[in-house]
Image (spheres, rainbow, N blue to C red):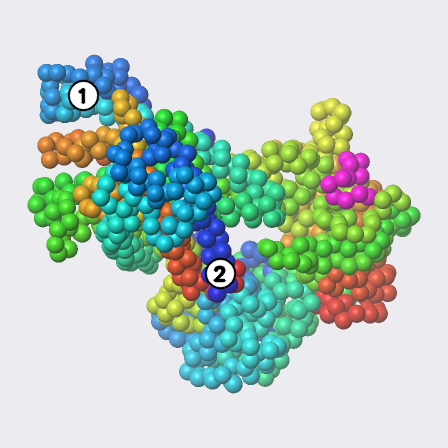
Amino acid sequence: MLALIIRRLLTAIPTLFGIILASFFLMRAAPGGPFDGERPLPPDVQEALRASYGLDRPLWEQAWIYVSRLLRGDFGPSLVYRDFTVTELVAQGLPISLTLGGLAIALALLIGITAGLFAAVSAGKAADKSIMMLATIATALPTFVTGPALALFFGLWLGLLPVSGRGDGIAWLVMPVVALALPVSGAIAKLTRAGLATVLKQDHIRTARARGLSEKKILFKHGLRPALVPVASYLGPAAAGLLTGAVVVETVFGLPGLGRYFVQGALNRDYPLVLGVVTLYAGLIILFNLFADLIYGWLDPRMREE
Amino acid sequence: MRSLLHPNHWPLWIVIMLVAAALLLPFVIPWTYDQIDWDAVRAPAFTGSHLLGTDEIGRDRLARLAAGTRITIMVAIAAALVSLVVGIAWGATAGWVGGKIDEAMMRFVDALYALPFMFIVILLMVIFGRSILLVFVGIGLVEWLTMARVVRGQVMALKQRPFILAAEAAGTKPLTIVIKHILPNIAGVALAYLMLTVPQVVMVESFLSFLGLGVQEPLTSLGILVKEGADDMDVTPLGLLLPGGALVLILVCLTIEGERLRDKYS
Amino acid sequence: MSLYSLRNLAIEIADQQLVEGVSLEVEAGQCTAIIGASGSGKSLTCLTPFGLNSGQASGEMLLDGIDLSTTSAEEMRKARSQLTGFIFQQPLTALTPHLTVGAQLKEAAAQGDIVLDRADIIQKLERVGLSRADEKLDQFPHRLSGGERQRVLIAAAIAHRPKLLIADEPTSALDASLRHEIMCLLDDLRAEHGLGMLLVSHDIASVEGHADQLVVMDQGAMVESGPVAKVIANPKQDYTRRLIAATPRLSESAPVLPKTGKTMLETKEVCVEFPKPGWRRGKISAIQDANISVHQGEALAIVGGSGSGKSTLGRAIAGIGPLTSGSIEWEREKLPKRRSRNLAMRASIQPVFQDPIASLDPQWKVSNIVAEPLKNFQPEMLQTDRQIRVRNALNEVGLDEGYLNRNPASLSGGQAQRVAIARAIVAEPDLLVLDEATSALDPLVGAEILKLLAQLQCDKRLSIIFITHDIASARRLCHRIVVLDKGHIVDEGNMGDILKNPQSEITKKLIAVS
C-alpha cells in the first residue's frame, strides 16, 4: 500500500512541477500580459511587478523566484483586483468552493450509491429501469442549465430559495449544491448498479450462495466492496468535474467562490490569478486522486500490490 | 449499421430530426439569426412571424435556436472526430507496440486524465485568443484521452488473440495486419465511444460559450443562448428553457444511444 | 436408502426443457460421476435441485430424507449450509477477493455452526495439502496459485461437515500435473468423512479410478448408467461406445504410425527469455537449452504442464514467438529470428492453435481466412487458381463449399478448427505446429480432429509437432515424445519406451492422470 502511495506521488510531483513551470513560461510569453507593455498599467503597479518578478534578472532566476514563491503560497499580485494579491483572493474564495464541492460529492455519493443499490436489487423490474433512465438523464444535465432552471423554478416562481448571493444560514447552499451534485449522482448510480450487476454474476458470489449464506449477507459482505470499485475509479474525474461545475454554479448564483474569480480573471486576462488557480486546482485534484486510490486499495486488495 | 431503422435507435433519430429541422429552418422562416426586427423587441411567442418571439435585441428566437443547434452540432462532430483520430492513433500505437513505450504513453494519459483539463483549455484560450479553430482543436484534445485508453485496451486484447499470430505465420506484414485485422475489429467500439464523445464535447463547448470563451458573436451556439436566456430569465423564461431543453434533449439522446452501442461492443 | 437420489429429474429454464428423465443415486462414502460433452446438462443436473441457478427442477429429489422439490428457498438455503458442500471448476475466481483465506474458511465452517480458531484453520488447510498454511491464512486469495486456491475451496466445502459433496469439474482448470493429486485428495477426504460425492466431468479417463457409479448424459438426457467398470467395459448404448472410443486412454492398443524419414527440424540449445513485466529488472526464463529434432513424416509430442514452456518452444519454432539464443535449423539451414524470416521459410512451418474460434478473424469470411497464406506466399497466383486451392483445402479437412462464405461466429468449435487446419495446409507446408489443438474441443470432436490429422500426416508426409498436456491423446498420433518441466527437457524418446519407463516425476504424474 505504501509503495502504491509513493509511486503515485512520484508521478504526481513531476506533473505538478511541469504545470507550474509551464504556467510561468506561458505567462512570460503570452501576448497581452503584464510584461509586454500592450496594456498600459499605472506606474506603481509596474514598479511592484518589476520588484516582485525581478524583471531585470536573467530568465532562469526569474523562474526560480516564481517557483519558490509559488511553493510558499505566494501567487503574486492580481492584475485586476488591484488591492489584493492572488493569495488573498484564493483565501477568500477557496473555502466557498471547497464547501460547495465537498457537499456536492457527499450528496452525489449518498444519492448515487443508494439509487444504484436499489436498482441492482430489483434488476429487470420497473424500478430498475426507471431509476436508470433518471440516472442517464441526470448525467446529461449540464450545471449551467440546471443551475438557472432551478433558480427560475424555486427562486423566482416559488420564492423558496435565494436566487443569488451568499447569505447566512444554509439556504444559499441548497440549489448550487443540488445543481452540482445531479450529474455526478447520476454517474455514480449507473456505476454502482453496473458494478453490482457484474459482481453478482461472478463466481465468488456463487460460492457464497452455495455455502448457504443469506442474500443480505452475500450482498453486503461479498458483493458490495468489489462493486464499488468502478465508483472509486470515478472519484478522481468526478472531482475534476465538480471543480469545473463549481465555476458555473458560482457564476450563476453569484457566489464569491474561487471559480468565479477564475472566470473573471480569464475574461480580464488577469494572468497571475488564472495561473494561480489552475495550479491550485491541479494540485487539489492530484491530492484527491491519491485519496481515491487509497479507497480503491481498501476495496480491492489486488490493487495494493500493483 | 445495416439496421439503423430498427426501433432500438429511437434516440439517434430524435437527434437526426432535430438537426434536420435546424438545417431546414432557414428555408422556412423569413428571419435569420442575426437579423434585428426593430418593431418587435422582447416579443412573446406568436408575435407576427416570430413563432417563438424575439430576444432582448429583437432577433427571432426560433432562428437563433436553429442556428445555435447547427453550430453546436457542427463543433461537436468536428471536435469528436479530432478526438477520434488522435485517440485511435495514440491508443493503437501504444497497444500495438507494447512494452515500455506503451507504459510511458499510458502514464502520460493517466497523468493528464486527472487534470482539470477544462481550466487548461480556458487558459489556452485566454492566452492565444478565441478562434473557432482553437475551439475545435481545444475541445477535441480534451476528449481524446478516453478514446486512447479504450482503443489501447482493445488493441492489446486483440494482439493476444491467436488469429493475429496466425496472420503473422501466414506471412502477412505487420502494417497490413494492423490495417486489415486490427482496425476492422476495433471499429465497433470506436464508433460507440465516438457517439459518447459527442455529448461530452457539446457540454464542453456549451460550457465555454456560456462563460463567454467559446463561439463568438455574431455566431451563436446553444451555450450562448442558455447564457442569454439565464440573464433574462425573470422576464422571458422561454429564453432559457428552449435552448436548455434542446441541449438536454441532444445530450440525453446521444448518451443513451452511445451507451447502448458501447454495451453491445464490449 | 441412498444419501441422495434423483428420479426422472427434469429441468426447465425460460420455458425451455433442458434436462429430462435423469435418475441417479449417491451412496454415503461413494462417488457417482456424471460424464458428458459440454451442453449435455450435467452441471444443470447438479446445481438446479439446490436452487443455485434460475432453472426449475421437477421430479423426485431426495437428500438425506428431505424432499427437495417441496422445500422453500429459505429451507433450501439451510439445507445447503448444513448438508452440502460445493466445489466448482474455476478456482481463480471462486474466492472473494477482499476477504482473507482464513476469514472465508471460518465463515464456511460457521454455516454448520462450527467455530474454528486459528489453530483449527491451519490444521484444516494443511490437511488439504496447502504448504505454509500459517502464512497463507492471513493472505488474500490473489496471492495463491490456482492449485492452492482449489485446495482452500475443498477445505471450505467440507468445513461445515456436510454429508454430500458436489464437485463440478474440479480439476479441469488445474494444471495437468496437479489433477491426479487433487482427485486422490478428494477420494481420501470422502473415505475419512464418509461423504457421498457427486462428480461431474467431461473426461472418462479422469473418472475411471475414482468413481463407483457412472452416469452418461447427452443433450439433456441420460444415455446410460451403472457401475463404472461395467459401463466402460461393456457400453450398451451407441453414444457411450463412441464416447469411450473417442477418449484416449493409455490402456488402449498402440496405434500403427507411418514410417519416418530424414531429419527436417533440429533445435540446438534454444533459450527463450521474457523481460519481467512493468518496470522491474531481470528476465524470466521460459525455455532453457532445448534440443529436439523432427523427422520427415514424424509426429513429435511436446508434453508438459502449464508453465512448462511447451507453447513458448512451439512458437519459437514456428517463428511467431521470441527466441533469445540458440539456433533452429530447417533442412540444415539456420532459421533467422522471428521478424527476419522470409516468406519461403514461413511457408514451410504453419501453426494451429488451441482456441479455434479465436484463431479466426471474426470480421473475415472463411474463404479469405484460408486464402491469406496463399496471397502472401504465392502472390503471382491467379485468383481463380487460388479459389480452387482454397476449395481443395476445405475438402481435405471435410468441409464443403457451403463454408466459403460463413463467418467464424457461425461455426462450431470443431468446424472452426477444421478451417484453421485448412488454412495451415493450403500452402503445402512441411511441418505443422499444433499447440493444444484438441484440448478445447469436446471428446468426440477432438477425436475426429485427431483422426483427420493422422490422415493428413499419412497422405502428405507431413511432420507434426503436437503440443499437449494429455499424453494419451499424443500417443494416438505421435512417434516420439519430449517432456518439459519448467523450461527443461526432462524426458525424451520413443513414445512406447517413455510410457513404460518414465524417468522424471512430472512424466509419472502426467501418465497417472491419463
- The image quarter in which residue B235 lies: top left
Which residue matches tag 1?
A: B60
- The image quarter in which residue B71 lies: top left
Are discs 2 and 1 less than 8 Å apart at CB?
A: no
Q: Quadrant of the N terminus of chain B?
A: top left
Q: Main secondary structure of the magenta part?
A: helix
- Image height check: is C59 above or below C391? below
Q: Toward the viewer: A92 or C477?
A: A92
Q: Does the magenta portion include C346?
A: yes
- Image height check: is C240 above or below B51? below
Which residue matches tag 2?
A: A6
Q: Which residues are magenta?
A: C335-347
Instruction: Name the residue: 25% across, 30% down.
Output: B224
Percent from the top left, x then y, of residue B206? 30, 34
Percent from the top left, x then y, of residue A76? 32, 45
Q: Chain of mark 1?
A: B
Q: Does the magenta portion include C214?
A: no
Left or right: B129 in relation to B177: left
**Which three-letter amino acid code belongs to the residue tagged 2?**
Ile
- Image height check: is B197 above or below A98? above
